[in-house]
Image: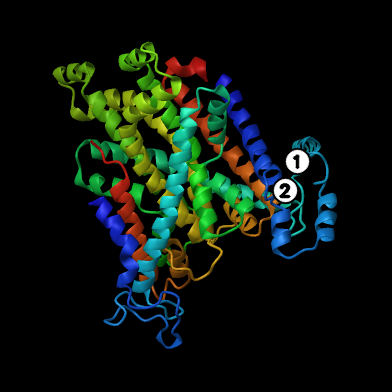
């Protein structure tokens, strides 16, 4: 319960942080582009009053939060549409991409880690490649190799592959540690087959640091989702965000950042629950 | 070895046979040949020359980002005995790194310099948290207590006793951060935030290569391999 409250607090902090960065810091996100576009003083002032930017910052923040709770994310400066309407169709696309990647990443990373722990050459080559190659480059190669890339499983697999590298590395080192413990010696002395030792004794014991790293990978997963959406031309939150930043459309950026943070926190809550399920000792903490 | 490679990338443009920006409309999308070892792109620019210049540009951006991230991050770690800072660093982690950079780019506008700044700032909080943890480990050691006992000032203990001992770990961490900065600056350049189309940069080259993928795969091949090899060199190896 405490963890979940902490995670929800993180959403609030991210919203506030984005608000502070875009409205309070010098070089205001709305005024900056107007000055660059060569707008005169009067136009700037009219815009400020129109958007409520002449109000004190606390009033603005309060208004922003109360609008947010009612589901009103403001209007896009560039497109004139409500931000929630821009984000709604994109949300489903991003969630299904991120979560299918997450679901594939976990078994993929653990399998690679098990193979690596057995000193298999294949894993020696694949894991460093998954960690080092930038996703926007391997994605380009995938698009080159496969003619039709409109189906979701292609970018999902790509995302899963790159995020599974770190999972594999942690699985490997965790497995190696567990293999050195005395209870594995006992299992071997009992004459259990190596496969049974791995599956029944070593793997379950080694999973806790692995699940923790899955939570840490959520950030990379979502960054990767943004890049993959741009690369594979998938109309998701990442695309909305990048276009919003390129046009400096700050209500859109604020909305998109909030939605991505919510997905980020959702994954982390899921991971917290998963840890509790795998290791009952940690349940009280969740 | 790594340093030699970095220096080589920095001075690479002197080996470039052509200007990286000049377009030759008669030489559009030519496969690799003797005159153009890596072929030409959709505007007839020599990919080999652009690759050499691009490495320099990408590396300078990355180095600046790393300096900002590690420099201010270490400083941030040193001041985290004030609880407010600790809370700030933890809070900043609520946004995934690339997302924080994107928000900063909305504020700062698009250019190579702002990419470096945005990527660097996103690394401050993780570096500060790491530094704080390292300092915590060193602080409880007997020789630190000894230094305090002989009456050294807090500043002296921090800069002369703790920091030199934290340095080896921080150096490894900085190399790792360099990797993230390279990955993220190239990603943002790839997404079009250099604000200058046609700039020779590895990220930009990959975006351009993406446009003419079917006709000229060689444009995106070279910068992609270069970034992969560099990241493979800087990432921590197992065992």
Chain of the residue under label 1:
A
| Identity of the residue drawn at 47% across and 34% down | B75
Q: Nearer the viewer, residue B172 or A133?
A: B172
Residue A272 seen in render: yes
Residue A54 in percent (x, y) is at 83, 46
Disc number placed over residue A71 in the picture, else none:
1
Q: Nearer the viewer, residue B141 or B216?
A: B141
Among all residues in the image, which is located at the extreme top?
B149
Q: Is residue B78 above or below residue A24?
A: above
- Asked if the residue at tag 1 contacts the one at tag 2, i.e. Cβ–Cβ closer than 8 Å, the answer is yes
Q: Nearer the viewer, residue A58 or B222?
A: A58
Side (left or right) of B65 relative to B141: right
| Identity of the residue drawn at 34% across and 69% down | B13
Side (left or right) of B70 relative to B104: left
- Mark 2 or mark 1: whose residue is earlier in sequence: 1
Disc number placed over residue B126 in the picture, else none:
none
User: How many numbered dots are placed on residues in this image?
Assistant: 2
Residue A280 in percent (x, y) is at 44, 17
Residue B132 in percent (x, y) is at 44, 27
Chain of the residue under label 2:
A
Secondary structure of the residue carrying tag 2 is helix
Disc number placed over residue A84 in the picture, else none:
2
| Identity of the residue drawn at 43% across and 46% down | B67
Which quadrant holds residue A234?
bottom right
Which quadrant holds residue A174?
top left
| Identity of the residue drawn at 26% across and 24% down | A178
Q: Is residue A131 above or below residue B208?
A: above
Badge 2 and badge 1 both on one subunit: yes
Side (left or right) of A244 relative to B238: right
Q: Is residue B87 above or below residue B149?
A: below
Q: How far, Cα to Cα, is label 2 from label 1?
A: 7 Å
Task: Using a 10 Å C-alpha cutoff, classify the residue at mark 2 as few (fewer than 14 neighbours), some (14 to 19) or many (20 or more).
Answer: many
């Amino acid at each position: 319960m405490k963890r979940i409250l902490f995670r929800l607090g993180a959403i609030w902090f991210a919203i506030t942080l984005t608000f502070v960065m875009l409205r309070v810091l010098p070089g205001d996100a709305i005024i900056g582009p107007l000055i660059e576009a060569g707008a005169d003083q009067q136009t700037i002032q009219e815009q400020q009053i129109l958007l409520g930017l002449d109000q004190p910052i606390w009033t603005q923040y309060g208004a922003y939060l109360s609008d947010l709770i009612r589901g009103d994310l403001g209007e896009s400066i560039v497109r004139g549409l409500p931000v929630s309407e821009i984000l709604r169709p994109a949300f489903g696309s991003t969630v299904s991409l991120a979560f299918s990647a997450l679901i594939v990443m976990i078994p993929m990373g653990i399998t690679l880690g098990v193979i690596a722990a057995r000193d298999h050459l294949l894993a020696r080559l694949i894991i460093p490649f998954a960690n080092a190659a930038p996703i926007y480059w391997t994605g380009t190669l995938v698009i080159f190799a496969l003619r039709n890339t409109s189906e979701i499983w292609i970018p999902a697999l790509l995302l899963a592959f790159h995020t599974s590298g770190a999972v594999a590395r942690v699985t490997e080192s965790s497995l190696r540690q567990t293999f050195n413990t005395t209870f594995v010696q006992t299992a071997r002395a009992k004459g259990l087959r190596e496969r049974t030792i791995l599956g029944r004794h070593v793997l379950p014991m080694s999973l806790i640091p692995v699940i923790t790293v899955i939570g840490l990978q959520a950030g990379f997963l979502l960054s990767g989702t943004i890049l993959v959406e741009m690369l594979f031309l998938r109309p998701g939150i990442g695309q909305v965000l990048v276009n919003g930043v390129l046009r400096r459309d700050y209500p859109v950026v604020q909305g998109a950042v909030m939605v991505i943070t919510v997905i980020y926190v959702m994954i982390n809550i899921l991971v917290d629950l998963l840890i509790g399920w795998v290791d009952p000792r940690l349940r009280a903490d969740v | 070895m790594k340093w030699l490679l970095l220096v080589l990338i920095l001075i690479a443009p002197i080996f470039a046979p052509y200007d990286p920006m000049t377009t030759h409309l008669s030489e559009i999308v030519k496969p690799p040949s003797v005159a153009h070892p890596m072929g030409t792109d959709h505007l007839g620019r020599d990919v080999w020359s652009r690759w050499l210049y691009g490495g320099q540009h990408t590396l300078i951006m990355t180095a600046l980002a790393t300096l900002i991230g590690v420099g201010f991050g270490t400083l941030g770690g040193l001041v985290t005995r004030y609880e407010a800072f600790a809370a700030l660093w933890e809070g900043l982690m609520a946004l995934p790194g690339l997302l924080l950079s994107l928000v900063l780019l909305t504020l700062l506008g698009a250019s190579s310099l702002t990419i470096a700044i945005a990527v660097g700032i996103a690394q401050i909080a993780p570096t500060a948290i790491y530094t704080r943890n390292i300092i915590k480990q060193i602080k409880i050691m007997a020789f630190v207590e000894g230094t305090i006992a002989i009456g050294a000032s807090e500043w002296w203990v921090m800069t002369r006793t703790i920091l030199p001992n934290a340095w080896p770990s921080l150096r490894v961490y900085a190399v790792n951060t360099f990797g993230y900065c390279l990955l993220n600056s190239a990603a943002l350049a790839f997404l079009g935030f250099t604000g200058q189309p046609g700039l020779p940069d590895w990220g930009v080259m990959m975006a351009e290569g993406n446009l003419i993928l079917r006709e000229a795969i060689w444009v995106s091949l070279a910068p992609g391999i270069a970034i992969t090899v560099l990241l493979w060199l800087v990432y921590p190896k197992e065992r």
